[in-house]
Amino acid sequence: MPKYIPEPFRIKVVEPITKTTREEREQIIKAAGYNVFNIPSEKVYIDLLTDSGTGAMSDNQWAGMQLGDESYAHCRNWFHFEETIRRITGLKHVIPTHQGRVAENLLFSTVLEKNMVVPNNNHFDTTRANILANGGIPLDLVIDEGKDPDLLHPFKGNLNIDKLEDTIQKYGKNKIPLTMITITNNSGGGQPVSMENIRQARAVCDRHGIPLFFDACRFAENAYFIKTREKGYENKAIPDIVREMFSYVDGCTMSAKKDALVNIGGFIAVNDERLAEQIKEKLILIEGFLTYGGLAGRDLEAIARGLIEVQKEDYLAYRIGQAKYLGDLLAEKGVPCLKPIGGHAVYVNARKFLDHIPQREFPGQSLVVNLYLHSGIRAVEIGSYMFAHKDPKTGEVNYPDMDLVRLALPRRVYTGGHLDYVADSLGELYAARKTLHGMRITEKGESPLRHFVARLEFIK
Ligand SMILES: *Cc1c(COP(=O)(O)O)cnc(C)c1O
């Protein structure tokens, strides 16, 4: 029996959720065009669409919200926010934004010139889009182990250091305004990056005079993996590991909707004063004054408190434990998943799960829709439906390496009982997998972000 690490909190406020009937769900999903983004959230029983902004705040954070100072400039909460981020990261200049992608937009619109390249382990979709929108070229340089869904490796998010060196040789340092590392590697399955790898990336960047940045969304989850998997860190405290991680970078972008345990917010932190000044000028134009950046005073307070709470070891053991527990339950039932289980989500290998459905009929989306129909659970497809687009020149469709279904775990929201239900539902579907059908797109298949807007139907 997989082991469940009990929640290191008790429940003080509850939000009812209700289960619909199969007949109701058939109506709802049909009206939604078989696109789960169109389902009203009240018609979802367990919502594993994303871990972004979906977490539960603590009593301490809610108490902080009551202490929001809503003065326009230099409110009390700004000082707490700035001081907390400086202390955690050691970075000098802190710039608040209303979410992570704005931090990316401000950074890349400032440092990028046409045809510059930005290496990363794997760029997250909004990071990639912001680099492309500013004329840059995003490069994914994750280690080869990180591309194999069945291979076990403790740090599958690591950057390929040889490829980084080759990239710098090929393009030259003047074409590379910065190198990024995403911790944990969201697009690669929430896989962590080792301290050794961060140190090696730093050494390469130093040799060539290139700044190194984190996409820091899940910095605390990454630190917990370092503590539990990397030699020499077993007895170190999480805040010390975090501080060491950040000691190797010149800056970071952050979505507070992840490891700051809040529902909205973000920031940029950098050491370079000139870069900070350039970004701040744009901030005033786009987000707001330097000390609030699109957020209310109370939001800044909740973020400051969340950034401290997220580094508590009992929280992280429970958090990472939840994903592992769900993954272990699914493995017992034979459901194929990406291995090892990442920090914030379990990724089901839909291509294997539905190996009778060809990629062009979207096995991942079929699994997502069938999971909702079967049990009211909302997951998300990351595969052919999201990524397989026609090459505008050749007319050929480029299919992605993997067809995955992501079960993302909101922070501090669902209990072990909910996870048991999710595992049982997927187990039942797995037993009935040969009866499931492929899908076709009926509307908006040409949209570049079609997974948000397209409509589909089953092929029967
Ligand atoms: C969520 C996320 C972002 C974007 O942040 P938003 O707050 O959603 O704009 C960027 N990078 C990674 C790795 C993320 O997970």
Image (cartoon, grey):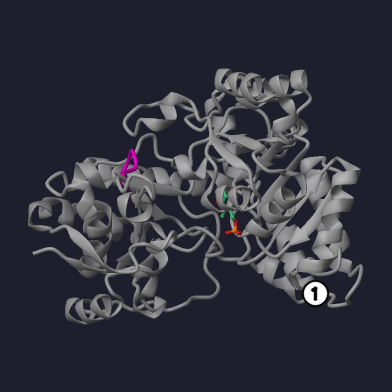
Residue 2: x percent and y percent? 32, 42
In-front residue for pair 458/445? 445
Secondary structure of residue under mark 1: loop
Residue drawn at the location 54% of the way across and 75% of the way down: 13
Q: Quadrant of residue 18?
A: bottom left
Magenta part, dominant SS: loop
Residue 335 in view in this figure: no
- Mark 1 closeness class: few <14, some 14–19, many ≥20 residues within 10 Å: some
Q: Quadrant of residue 351?
A: top left
Looking at the rendered image, the quarter that the C terminus falls into is bottom left
Query: In the image, 379: left or right of 135?
Result: left
Query: In the image, 376: left or right of 345?
Result: left
Query: In the image, 251: left or right of 20?
Result: right
Residue drawn at the location 48% of the way across and 37% of the way down: 191
The residue most toward the front is 393
In-front residue for pair 417/150? 150
Q: Amino acid at mark 1?
A: Gly
* 316 w.r.t. 78: above or below: above
Residue 217: x percent and y percent? 62, 49
Looking at the rendered image, the quarter that the N terminus falls into is top left
**Is 403 part of what is drawn in magenta?**
yes
The image quadrant where one finds ligand 1 is bottom right
In-front residue for pair 67/283? 283
Residue drawn at the location 63% of the way across and 57% of the way down: 101
Residue 208: x percent and y percent? 75, 21
Which stretch did the figure color magenta?
A: 398-404
In-front residue for pair 288/347? 288
The residue identified by callout 1 is: 68
Residue drawn at the location 56% of the way across and 24% of the way down: 230
**Is 448 part of what is drawn in magenta?**
no
Residue 400: x percent and y percent? 34, 42
Residue 423 in view in this figure: yes
